[in-house]
């Protein structure tokens, strides 16, 4: 469930970011006219790799978090098994 909320949040943030980029490009072109098109193109060329890096880092952080959760779950299972062994040993 939280993954769905996280994905929805990413979509919302992406929409906001790309709307802001589109608005700035439109402003550059409207303000500078034809001469603003190269500047708008540069803004777009810079924005795409930066946003791709943000997405990659987010996915990497999510994978690291999932790996840590799996490790903790395995440790808890091991500890539970050891506690059960200790309980049996103490009852005998």
Image (spheres, grey):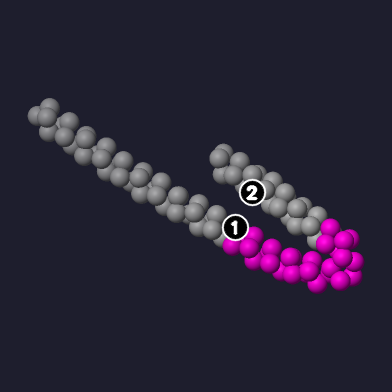
Q: Quadrant of the N terminus?
A: top right
Residue 3 lies, in percent from the top left, at: 56, 44
Q: Earlier in the sequence, mark 1 or mark 2?
A: 2
Name the residue at the top extreme.
91
Magenta stretch holds residue 32: yes
Query: What residue is disc 1 on?
Result: 55
Residue 4 lies, in percent from the top left, at: 60, 43
Helix, strand or loop at mark 2: helix
Q: Residue at x 31, y 41 (%)?
A: 76
Name the image quarter holding residue 40.
bottom right
In three-dimensional space, the C-alpha distance between marks 1 and 2, rounded to whole angstroms, equals 9 Å
* Label of residue 31 in the image: none
Q: Which residues are magenta?
A: 27-53
Q: Residues within 10 Å of mark 2 (few under 14, many from 20)?
A: some
Helix, strand or loop at mark 1: helix
Q: Quadrant of the C terminus?
A: top left
Name the residue at the front extreme.
32
Residue 43 lies, in percent from the top left, at: 74, 65
Residue situated in front as seen by the camera: 12 or 43: 43
Magenta stretch holds residue 17: no
Q: Is residue 59 above or below residue 81?
A: below
Q: Is residue 84 above or below residue 74?
A: above
Residue 83 lies, in percent from the top left, at: 21, 35
Q: Residue at x 75, y 57 (%)?
A: 21
Query: What residue is disc 2 on?
Result: 10
Q: Residue at x 74, y 65 (%)?
A: 44
Residue situated in front as seen by the camera: 86 or 9: 9
């Amino acid at each position: 469930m939280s993954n769905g909320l996280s994905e929805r949040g990413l979509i919302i943030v992406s929409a906001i970011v790309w709307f802001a980029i589109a608005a700035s490009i439109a402003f550059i072109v409207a303000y500078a006219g034809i001469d603003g098109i190269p500047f708008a193109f540069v803004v777009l060329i810079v924005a795409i790799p930066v946003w791709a890096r943000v997405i990659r880092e987010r996915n990497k952080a999510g994978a690291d978090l999932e790996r840590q959760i799996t490790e903790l779950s395995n440790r808890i299972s091991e500890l539970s098994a050891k506690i059960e062994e200790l309980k049996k040993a103490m009852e005998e």
